[in-house]
Image: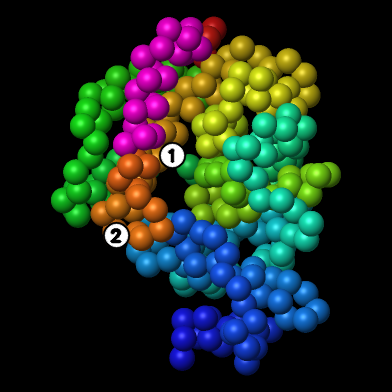
Amino acid sequence: MTELAAAFARIPFLAGFDPTAASRLAGLTNVNYLVDTGTERLVLRIPGAGTSEYIDRTAEEVAARSAAAAGVNAEVLFFDSADGLMVTRFVDGAATMNPDRFRDLDAVARAGLAFRQLHTAAAPFAVDFHLFGMIDDYKRLLAEKGAALPDGYAAAEAAADATRQALEATARPLVPSHCDPLCENFLDTGRRMVVIDYEYGGNNDPMWDLGDLSVEGLFGPEQDAALLRAYFGGDPPANEVGRMVAYKAMCDLLWTLWGVLQHANGNPADDFWAYAVGRFERCRALMSSADYQVHLASIGA
């Protein structure tokens, strides 16, 4: 029995369905399929090898269902928290976002509104997203694997201590957050933005989601302004802008380690070492800029 047929057999409404009718979709760490049953289109997600080392599937199910109930995620039709096998309803007529599509400021604004809906309307998630705890966890996993970090990582992490202190001294109430807003996790219908994939979903500082999307979408100042204005419904407070910029640096620091872990696990989907080094260099460049220090100072103002 093929992996796809075995997955179908575990899902009551797909048991016995012909696997050849499924077509492969993109995905960095998981295997995704579009399944056309003849009456509806569904998305099947088969979890990737090694993902159970760092993803809490029980917590993911809570986040995915909560976000769907809030009208932000696609409808979740099946979820097995034992390993993360999942089926969601396909979002018809939606464009999968990428940095080019996010040049449309109206699309950026729709993403900001989706974040606000998630942060204010979703029921609390099962776990909290602790940035610096995750950094420590990834470093532990990498040490166990004997994996090397990019040159200069330890020095950059030490330099990030001032950011950590500023954020923790002015900590915000945690809200349900996506925490991994890759462009490809945004599906734009032209009326609203659907945000999918809650593997890393947790209660977090809301500015993390905005900062991380800015980094993933290669946003410039105009896009950042559109995102913030949509989210806040007007001009954003300077200290919240500062938090967003701080998280732009910190997300690159965190996802550097994630990329090294994918490289260490032999994930064939991409050149994850180059990915990790690129994110690390961008983090260092931002933290060393004069503007960054101004934003950091504004956090506690």
Q: Is residue 227 above or below residue 190?
A: above
- Residue 187: where, in percent of width, then height? 69, 50
Residue 124 visible: no
Q: Which residues are magenta?
A: 277-297
Q: Left or right: 217 with respect to 269?
A: right
Q: Left or right: 98 with respect to 122?
A: left
Query: Residue placed at 42% from the left, 19% from the top?
Result: 286
Q: Residue furthest right?
A: 191
Mark 1 residue element: loop
Please name the residue that numbered disc 1 is placed on: 130
Mark 2 residue element: loop
Q: Left or right: 108 with respect to 28?
A: right
Between circles 2 and 1, the one closer to the viewer is 2
Taking depth in this image into account, of 10 and 170 the one nearest to the observer is 10
Which numbered circle lies on residue 266? 2
Circle 1: residue type: His
The alpha-carbon separation of the residues under discs 2 and 1 comes to 26 Å
Check disc 2: other Cα within 10 Å, few if <14, some if 14-19, many if 20+: some
Circle 2: residue type: Gly
The answer to whether residue 247 is magenta is no
Query: Residue placed at 63% from the left, 23% from the top?
Result: 224
